[in-house]
Image (cartoon, coloured by chain):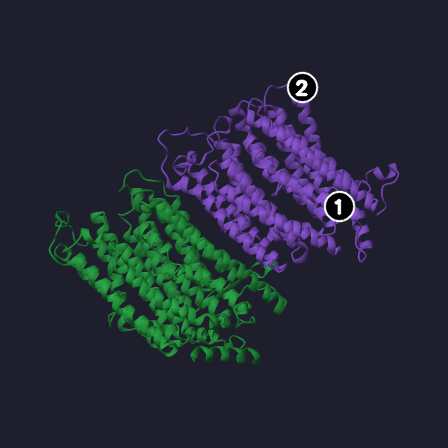
Chain colours: A purple, B green
Amino acid sequence: MEALKTIRPELLTLAPDQLRALSPYLFVFAGTLLAILFSAARVVKSRWPAFLIFIVSSIIGTVAALVLLREPPTLLFNGMMSSDAYANSFCVIFLVSAIVTAASSLKYLDNEELQQPEYYVLILFSALGMMLMASALDLIVMFIAFELMSLAVYMLVGFRRNDRRSNEAAMKYFILGSAASAVLLYGVALLYGATGSTSIRGIFAYLQAASGQGVTPVFAIGAWFAVLGFLFKIAVVPFHMWMPDVYEGAPVPVTGFMTTGLKAAAFAAFLRVFIATGYGSGVSAVIQNHIHDILWVSAVLTMVIGNVIALTQTNLKRMLAYSSIAHSGYILVGMIAGPLSEQGYAPVFMYLTAYAVMNLGAFVILTSLAARNDGGLNLHDFSGLSRRHPWLAFSLAIFMFSLAGIPPTAGFSAKYVLFYSAIQANEIPLVVISVLCSLISVYYYLRVLVYMYMRDTPDEVPVRRRVSVWSAAAIAAMVILTLQIGVLPARIVAAAKKAVTSL
Amino acid sequence: MAWLDSHLLTATVFLPLAWAFVGLAIPAGAGVNSFARVLVKTWAFFGAILTLTLSAMIYTRYVPTGSEFQLVENVAWISALGISYHVGVDGLSLWLVLLTTFLMPIVILSSFNAIEERTKEYYFLLLVLESAILGTFLALDIFLFYVFWEVMLVPMYFLIGIWGGREKIYAAMKFFVYTMFGSLIMLVGIFYLAYQHKIQFGAYSMDFVSLYKLQLNGGTFLATQSVLFLAFALAFAIKVPLFPLHTWLPDAHVQAPTAGSVILASVLLKMGGYGFMRIAFPILPLGVAYYQVTFMILGSVAIVYGAWVAMVQPDIKKLVAYSSVSHMGYVILGLFSLNAIAATGAYFQMLSHGISTGALFLLVGMIYERRHTREIGDFGGLSRVMPLFAIAFMIIVLSSMALPGTNGFIGEFLVLLGSWRTSPALAGVAALGVIFGAVYMLWMFQRVMYGPITRKENEGLSDLSAREALVLAPLLVAVFVMGIFPNVVLDKLEPAIDRFVARSRGEVRIETAEVLNPRDIAELSAILKEKEE
């Protein structure tokens, strides 16, 4: 692919099929603009216009992405973006998690007296950034998409303006996130210096040409920086310090959105770059070995530390934050195994999907139960929940079993496929460590069930909160999806395969 | 009916599950004896009876001389990984299925008065548990087996954790995490087997029958078969439970409600033995040969150790729990003796332990409901006030001690006979267990039932009610039928046992009747010979 040396306007015009391929982005973007207009004008002093525009545009966007899944991949903007099965499958994950987040936020924001239309605009903006990240084929585009997503999320994290923890979280996230972006950008610059291209395919072509004689040190350092930047973004040990504080400070639905959408987006972009830096493609043995070791150590540390610290948490939100670190570790196992196993990166995609579904479900329930200022999420507040809210407790139980990886749930089938691929890659010690780590996780996930089902309601009975219809619908949908992926995983396995083969 | 003919096993497995979900729709009743509650109980009871009927149909249709697996259903499930929904019945699964469906109505009937809280959820979980157990026994795909194996933990966890005794949460957690530990290690083994199948035969498959054909090297400590065997044996030995992995059992048994203890002792422990017979032995014959002596020693230790610990227990339920450790030791000893007599004995021992220990837990539950204590010291002289109870208790105690004429005798006798051929010394140690078994059982019986009534509370105890008699009657009948006419069971068991022994000795790869390649045979016979010397 020829590098973009001079801007040639004729390459930037869009043919009808390209316009079609862009439709999910256009719908979401249109929705964003409309929502801004309504919220800026404050024509109607109510949450409904922004919310409804949000829901409608993201549902249309999801449908468009689903339709595009059946069509052949299209290159856009001179090869800087690609609308392939990979991008479109991820778009579905992002938009669904955005919809679920918004649906659960509606009542939450009322309770917190934070109901402002900007909230929905920001979620939509970050969803758009995520979609662009998954489809970017050029590191510059990827970086811009990254910032679009991150800036919106920084604001969402600090959305509870009057709460100190929320402000602290936003500030921490902003500073550390910028540092990570800088590292990533530096890596991109070095890669450009070494290869003369910022396009993923260009870098890949350089690698193929250079295979056999090894890569230059500049390239190796660039690849390292890029990988480290991403490791920071996906918050694996030892780059995880910012995460629990940010997750705890952010409003509950935003935390849910970050653990699912944001994480999936970071992994989506990471995978694309990962292949370009020579690991995934298996082009350069030197880089392959180096990065393999970095990732191996990082995966083990992530799983062990994430799970062990989650074990000591008494606050459910914080526990899920640490467990989210642990789940990143499992996904890293899939990435290590990817190039060497027959399934390729399909298990990674499948795990991200399953994790998004079950974790979103758990966070919607947390959102519905949170008391003012995100209190009331300690373990003992869940005592006797099965009597106060039998259906919420039942759903949360399913999500906990799924997160712990117990059949027949999404978490189990995803873990099964993932660890199986790692065995195929001959990573037996890694798999043994992984399953032992998930044994640790069984304990803290089940502890939630102990409180909900086996302990009696505390003396001062917490207020029984009414669950909004929107949240209830979101929870029901996530429960059904969790069980569906768990009992009949054949479809999602096929979809994952299709998504990653288009990489 | 045509559908039922071709899907009999699926119907049996999923009927309790479907029944359970319909039962959830019954509105919760207010009082203990409200109409809704009675309806919930009866509904569950009839669900279990219907499942028993279906399993009786399996019994009548299973022809022992026919093909290995019968009533087979095989549907692709996750074809990308070679996983299928594959169920079928053979002699090994048939009797454990019958044991499960036979005990379930009894267990449900026994908890009619014991469970007053969250009645609906209780029966829901019992029926879900039944489905999971039946699925484990009937699965012919290792993935399907694993799924049912794990699902079974969930209802049991809630049964112990919600309706259990004072230490219920600790016991439930210990039970779950302990078992899960073994299962996860087994899962890694399953991955490896499936991967090997892909390498050796070029296609993914998770079927037991195709995994039986795998050729893996063995004979040394780090050989594939030895390592894999340990991975599987860990999961199954925890379930059995084999000394020294038995520590979860006394907690779980004592804390669980009566129905939970019965199911746990009678059926869930058998899943360990069944796992050995279905997976570990036939797939990994060289691994079995390598660890044969180790496990035989552990089995004999378990027999004696379990009996000794049982002897000093002040709590009747704990005594019964440790007696399970002792009785299941015979199963391990019998299986690892690797001959048809001992294997038949081990299997028979699993069934008769299911009947007599289940009955013991029910009897303990009955006096606990009356006195709310299980301390042996709180009783004495009960036979004077509860004559019918005393008779039933006596019969079950005798069967548990393996008196000739009862079911316990056949199993233990065959195990001792068979293991004598492999290792006379260990058979001798195990025979001591029979004596200790008589000691702790009779001593407990004497202290509880005979002598003067020392406590005033015991004077007014009522004898068995009609419902309780109905609960015990089928078990008492089974004790004598199995003890006097063991051929009822053995006839439908033999061909399956023969196949099992042949496979575990690595003599033939059945189904294709392929003989192992000469190198493996030489290797194997060398190992076996070494062991015999």
**Marked residue nearer the N-terminal end (1 or 2):** 2
Q: Is residue A332 left or right of residue A191?
A: left
Q: Is residue B205 left or right of residue B264?
A: right
Q: Nearer the viewer, residue B513 or B518?
A: B518
* x and y percentages locating residue A379 in the rendered image: 44, 36
**Residue for point 43% across, 42% down:** A449
Q: Is residue B195 left or right of residue B338?
A: right
Q: Using the image, determine if residue B176 lies above or below residue B206.
A: above
* Three-letter residue code for mark 1: Ile
Secondary-structure class at tag 1: helix
* Tags 1 and 2 touching, CB below 8 Å: no
* Three-letter residue code for mark 2: Ala
* x and y percentages locating residue B252 in the rendered image: 35, 52
**Residue for point 49% across, 48% down:** A440
Q: Is residue A271 visible?
A: yes
Q: Nearer the viewer, residue B339 or A134?
A: B339
* x and y percentages locating residue A265 in the rendered image: 66, 41
Q: Quadrant of residue B497?
A: bottom left
Secondary-structure class at tag 2: helix
Q: Which mark is on residue B164?
A: none
Q: Using the image, determine if residue A279 lies above or below residue B350.
A: above
Q: Is residue A125 visible?
A: no
Q: Is residue B467 left or right of residue A91?
A: left
Q: Nearer the viewer, residue A467 or B251?
A: B251
Which residue carries the number 1 mark? A221
Q: Using the image, determine if residue B436 lies above or below residue A12.
A: below
Which residue carries the number 2 mark? A41
The subunit carrying tag 1 is A
Q: Nearer the viewer, residue A149 or B463?
A: A149
The subunit carrying tag 2 is A
Q: Residues within 10 Å of mark 2 (few under 14, many from 20)?
A: few
Q: Residues within 10 Å of mark 1 (few under 14, many from 20)?
A: some
